[in-house]
Image (spheres, rainbow, N blue to C red):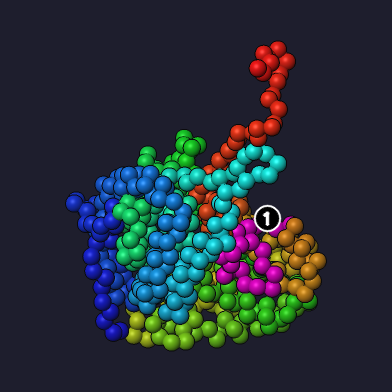
Amino acid sequence: MTALPMLEGPGDYIAGRFVEPQARDGELVAVSPADTRDVIARYGFSAAQVDDAVQAARAAFPGWRRLGEPARRELLFAYQSKLKEHRELLALTLAREVGKPLWEAKTEVDAMIGKVDLSLGEGARFTANETLETLPGEIRHAPLGVLAVIGPFNFPGHLPNGQIVPALLTGNTVVHKPSEKTPCTATLIARCMHEAGIPPGAFNVVQGDGRIGARLSDHAGIDGVLFTGSVAVGRRIAQANAARPDRLIALELGGKNASIALDDCDLERTARAIVFAAFITSGQRCTATSRLFVTLGIASRLIARITELTRALRIGYVLEPDVFMGPVIAESARDALLAAQAKARLNGFESVVTGAALRVDHQHGFYVRPSLVRAESAELEVPGYTDTELFGPDLAVHVVRDEDHALELASRSRFGLTAGVFTASREAFERAVDQLRVGVVCWNRPTAGASGRLPFGGVQDSGNHRPAGILAGLTCTYPVGLMLTPPDDAPIASWPGFPPAQ
């Protein structure tokens, strides 16, 4: 491995300055899962920094809100320019700390850049002031105040950025806590904000482990939490705020996403879309396809083609060209994934491509071979496997009788994020949309790769509200109804028993 430079400086950004904690509660050592010899940064952290960051955001809120949307737009476009300027460093840092191939890291940075245009363009119309022609009144959208944005490890740039930009545009101030697994991208976001001239305190970053996230999400000084991550942590955040009905808790959680392939689908298009969605980002996407329900007429041919594509995927070091898949995020994640797959094989799933730890030449990382299994019966369920988001490269295939059978089984999940339907029939697709209780339904497209121009989020255990996608600005605001003075020629109201107008 060629030696790569460490990122210099503190990890916390508070009130317009990068600051070291005065007394450390711990240290984060950012090590690349693609090669554990690659240490990217070391950041000290302290719970006291949470208090400082929230106080800075609270102090900055009145001025940032009164600055007005035109001035906030100008500053956010300056932030976008800094993202473009630092694109290569951002992509390299993402690739190293997440373990995603460099080409994919570049697409994430490009999505961050594009999100500014979307949020300030199409997204802003959902929070625009509206005058009602039939009533002397208006609808406006006011900022919630200080928002905690707690991000995930798999997209440490794109996903928080998609919440931070709408939050700032609508007049909120932000305290961002990145995943302890991927702390470095957040410091680069802060650098871009700083260089763009975002006023001190409007945007802040605090680093740390779960203790820091818990302190922030339960802090008395915040007005809302935008969280992206696991169901377990989302539940803890909701429980910690059970006595705070005034506080927004917007959760974008996991998925156990199904795709349905019917006999009339385009077999090659379907196979490619499913393999892509199952294994892109090493399966570490909340939108990954992890279950496939395929009808009997095409099952053998489709499974054969999926098997060929899966075996042909190139797995390797993330900075090498033409690599599709890197490692999973940590050794513990790899161990848990392989244990769940072994349990599935012991309980009725036939191994078609066996998932296993993988040695990549000259690298010391957490690589795995994708897993493809076939259920011995369509309705086979294995607790801890079929009902659990594994967050790794794993695909289970269930052969079903027909469309109705597929929809019935796909609907049994406690998750409800996204689903794919592969068929030539628009009518069959619409039947699926009507029956599947999910936030996004894809027609002849991969479940992974949602459009920022659409709402994004889930139902059931996959979350609530819509803290991502085109409606993120709505999540960051509350509507205000204005009852305006009636026209001069409007009659003065009268009521029984009330003195008449003079």
Q: How many marks?
A: 1
Residue 437 counted in the magenta span: yes
> Residue 377: x percent and y percent?
70, 67
* Nearest the eye: 56 or 463: 56
Seen from the viewer's position, the closer of residues 430 and 286 is 430
Left or right: residue 440 compared with residue 94: right
Compared to residue 258, the image places residue 86 above or below, namely below
| Amino acid tagged 1 | Arg
Query: Around disc 1, counting alpha carbons within 10 Å, would you say few (fewer than 14), some (14 to 19), or many (20 or more)?
Result: many
Q: Is residue 496 above or below residue 108?
A: above
Q: Nearer the viewer, residue 397 or 3?
A: 3
Residue segment shown in magenta: 435-456
What residue lies at 78% left-to-right and 61% top-to-bottom? 431
Describe the element under mark 1 as helix, strand or loop: loop
Q: Which residue lies at the image location 71% right of the left edge and 81% below the top edge?
A: 267
Is residue 119 one of those drawn in magenta?
no
Q: Label 1, on which residue? A: 437
Type of secondary structure dominating the magenta stretch: loop
| Residue 237: image location, x then y, percent | 45, 46
Q: Is residue 190 visible?
A: no
Q: Quadrant of residue 105?
A: bottom left
Q: Place residue 256 in its image quadrant.
A: bottom right
Quadrant containing the N terminus is bottom left
Q: Is residue 473 left or right of residue 293?
A: left
Residue at 23% over, 65% down: 9
Q: Residue at x 81, y 66 (%)?
A: 427
Residue 171 % position (x, y): 44, 50
Task: Residue 44: give x, y in percent of width and height.
Answer: 24, 58
